[in-house]
Image: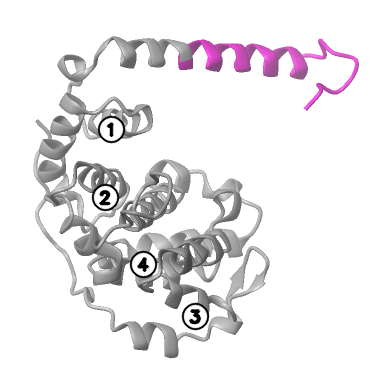
Amino acid sequence: MPPRPRQTEPPFPTEFPLNELLDRTDWASLATAGGTGESLPAALTLLTSSDPVARETGLRTALGSVTHQNSIYEATVPVALFVAAILDHPAVTAGDSGHGAPTPSTLVRLLDWLGDTAADADDEFSATDEHLDSEVCRAEIRAFREAKPAIFPKVQALLGHDSTDVRHAALIAVIPLVEHPFLTQHQAEIVGHARRLLAASTDRHHRNRALDALKGWGYNTGELENASDIAARERYARLQAARASWDGNWAGGGYSEEPPF
């Protein structure tokens, strides 16, 4: 088992008064996918509404504008801090029962968003940030990485939630957070949760994230994989090989025209 690093964590704020996040952030100066974040305070406020329709509008408007096509923008970090701050808000934790067709709860969707966004700024992605288009892009990713220790405690608190859906969403969200150097000491705790997820879940996305994390941290996952995991891994390997072959043929002049992308 990998050695447990010595804790050298600096003091990071773990409480974010919502009024300070909304009022003290210069939203209009922060870039989003469609311009600036001037309208974000109103959209974020909807996330804590008692009306599930209003929360749905907030989810679509606020979160979509700061993570369009897996990109991270200047406004992404303050939005992520706000989302972390409301994970224990009564309107969010109450769930969305009785709201039409069954959909993931607001809490699960917020956790999913945090996890996906944190993964877009994880170690593997950031290791290639020199290939990004601009210094601005690299700065935005670094800013999100620096915010991970502040977001982590809010997500960690949900790892023992009564709802299986919430527990699993929290685990998938916390995995890319604990890659931060000040949080790696929490990986041993996460391993136990990952093992429990793999023993119970059939969700392909969740299983891939959990298995990849354990492998990346140096753990043997052989006994945790099932037939579906093996088939998915082999299918991915074939796709990678096919892509490499295609790229090689294209680079070698095997085609007279551009491929039909």
Q: Main secondary structure of the magenta part?
A: helix
Mark 2: secondary structure: helix
The residue range painted magenta reads 236-261
Residue type highlighted by circle 2 = Val
Earlier along the polypeptide chain: callout 1 or callout 4?
Answer: 4
Mark 4: secondary structure: helix
C-alpha distance separating marks 4 and 2: 14 Å
Q: Is residue 26 above or below residue 120?
A: below
Mark 3: secondary structure: helix
Q: Is residue 211 left or right of residue 75?
A: left
Name the residue: 64% across, 58% down: 134
Residue 216: x percent and y percent? 28, 32
Residue type highlighted by circle 1 = Gly
Name the residue: 40% across, 70% down: 51
Q: Is residue 222 magenta?
A: no
Question: Label 3: which residue?
Answer: 41
Residue type highlighted by circle 3 = Pro
Q: Is residue 175 left or right of residue 7?
A: right
Earlier along the polypeptide chain: callout 3 or callout 4?
Answer: 3
Residue 233: x percent and y percent? 39, 15
Earlier along the polypeptide chain: callout 2 or callout 3?
Answer: 3
Q: Is residue 155 left or right of residue 161?
A: right
Residue 25: x percent and y percent? 46, 85
Question: Label 1: which residue?
Answer: 216
